[in-house]
Image: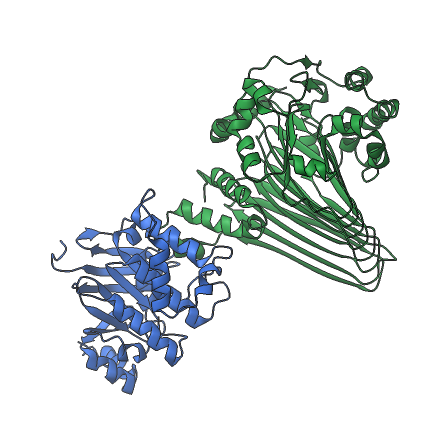
Amino acid sequence: MSDEIRRHNEDLASLDKDYATRYGFQDPVNYFHKGARGINHEVVEMISRMKKEPAWMTELRHAALDIFTAKPIPKWGNSELLSEIDFENIYYFMKPIEHQQSNWDNVPEYIKKTFDRLGIPEAERKFLGGVSAQYESEVVYHSMREDLKKQGIIFLDMDSGLREHPDLVKKYFGTVISTADNKFAALNTAVWSGGSLIYVPPGIDVKVPLQAYFRINAENMGQFERTLIIADKGSRVHYIEGCTAPVYSTDSLHTAVVEVIALEDSYIRYTTIQNWSRNIFNLVTKRASVYGNATVEWVDGNLGSRLSMKYPCIQLMGEGARGEILSVAFAGKDQHQDAGAKVIHVAPNTSSRIRSKSVSKDNGRASYRGLVKVHKNAANTKVSVECDALLIGEDARSDTYPTMEVDNDQVKVEHEARVSKVAEEQLFYLTSRGLTEDDARLLIVNGFMEPFTKELPLEYAVELNRLIELEMEGSIG
Amino acid sequence: MPDQKALFEFNDIHVEVDGKQIVSGVSLKILPGEIHAIMGPNGSGKSSLSNALMGHPDYAIMSGEAFLDGRSILSMSADERSRAGLYLAFQYPLAIPGVTVANFMRAALQAHRGKDADMSDFRKLFKAAMKALLIDPSFATRYLNDGFSGGEKKRIEILQMSMLNPKMALLDETDSGLDIDALKIVSEGINRFHNDSNALLLVTHYQRLLNYVKPHHVHVMIHGRIVKTGGPELALKLEELGYDWVEAEYAQGTGA
């Protein structure tokens, strides 16, 4: 690493002082297992062996590593930043403790303290049906309400899921996102660890949200969780994930793959509030297949990270399927949020709605990268795309890269894109009522985010507003 | 030195917008309990004067002085002037999408009371203020001025005034865009707010509002200057004869 990059990174770290106090603290840890830096077939073999996986998974991992190695760095998003990632400097597998716990009392003190500070056990007591807490590569704590278990609902970390429900995992794993989908999906497939497996039996309505929390603690850590959600016919489930990491001056990697399958007449909402520290590269592939009359909603909040590339995707496979993607991205100083959405209409009478909102502040950059594809057979489809960007300050940047491929005539497509600045007139109006300029700006930004915030459970809405406040502090207008 | 008796006083105010002088030496002294009206044709500089006094960054005060309760305000930012007790009811209130009227009002009141001040009475005060102005309770959760009619926006301006309870309120064309029923409701709101210890400066093109809110003093502003001052009868004369005669008087150099 050149001195210039190091200095730049140290500058970034110092920006994060508030983040550091609230989320960015580090635990000194003696890991049960800490592999070496770098990636090769031995690392992949070791991970698979430690997890005592079936042969098909081991083979899949090795094949995926070859695909990862062969594929070049993507030419879009931000290739310049991506090429800074030193894959040989990353730890690909760290196992903090030997056995996962289902009782907080048995979780080591330092980890318990971490999740206490992040409010996890409290949230579980208050309103969650199940909680999974991943620390580095593995889930250290997992629990689900007994009444949900009795209904046949499966909510496990992915490693336990593969052990306990090998046929279910084999049936769906990699069917929505193939190994070769992109370089980072291949990397995840090679070294995945942790994540969630959810299966909801036919007709069951999981009335309380299930939550997973992902925490990266070590420096130069790579977290590669793998999540698979299957809602069987007529069932309903809401899954929430949150993420944070300590502040370091060197980079870490978060590369998840999330596959969601909504069978006929089912409903899945997947809510993400990620709040990574500014040294995290966040390169995530998320995709849902939605069958007849089913609905999938991605509610995706992107704060923090150095570079995020994430485009939740919905494939409308069955007639009457519906999809919605509501996302916000906040790009602060030196950050690039390359976020977007993809909808693919395969079946007729399907509908989709994309709402993307981004805020760029200082020299932050937010990009919307979107794809709408309507197949030849997808008659009578409705598509609505709405992009809103808010710029704060002269150096903030916003780009939109929308792509539309429509191969059917009977399609109703609406597309709207707006870029606005925090207007002087609005600021004067609010300051003339006694609000300081910073408070006025924060109020305008919170208002801008409101269509997103109001979709969140109250606790998360409050948290998101707090995070935005943190991002806005010391903002230069 | 400010006049100890005056609640609001400004002297020889010059205002520039985009480098162009719009207000050219305006002075006024307002005592507690008084209602003043500045009347004038379009482009006379009366709205620029009120925006400049409130601290709008685009309306630069090039020279002059202004005192609220004896305190010089021109070095204060807009929010400091607001917290010091100055209020401007906007001619064109701005929309703030995503921010509900209630949340905005709470934030403004909190700013006036201080960050850690108790706000437990807010709901009650807010409800009562809404009711007094016949504002439908559903407006509490609507986004501030977003899609509101002209009359609704003006009512919300008066609502804010009644909640923030300023010492000195500048009302910029508050009657514009109001039908007769709305004008009555808004005027009643203004009259309820007014008392012996605060003061009003009504900035208006038409005399209409002055039928309901009775001024003690009327000033005519033309070409960035106050050219005539009188009692309520002056407003009636302007209503009848328009501004031409004042302009003519002023042009001849015989103005008051």
Q: Residue A332 at x, y = what percent?
A: 54, 38
Output the letter for the chain in blue: B
In the picture, the quarter occupied by the C terminus of chain A is: top left
Residue at 73% in and 17% down: A38
Is B165 above or below relative to B248?
above
Give the number of marks: 0
What kind of colouring is applied to the model shown? Answer: by chain
In the foreground, A26 or B9: A26
Q: Residue A269 at x, y = what percent?
A: 68, 46
Is A149 above or below relative to A293?
above
In the foreground, A357 or A110: A110
Q: Is residue B245 left or right of residue A342?
A: left
In the foreground, A322 or A345: A322
In the picture, the quarter occupied by the N terminus of chain A is: top right
Q: Is residue B16 left or right of residue B220?
A: right
Residue at 42% in and 49% down: A440
Residue at 60% in and 53% down: A388
In the foreground, A380 or A418: A380
Q: Is residue A343 left or right of residue A4?
A: right
Is B208 above or below relative to A429?
below
Q: Residue furthest left?
A: B4
Q: Residue A156 at x, y = what percent?
A: 71, 31
Output the letter for the chain in green: A
Q: Does residue B53 show up? A: no
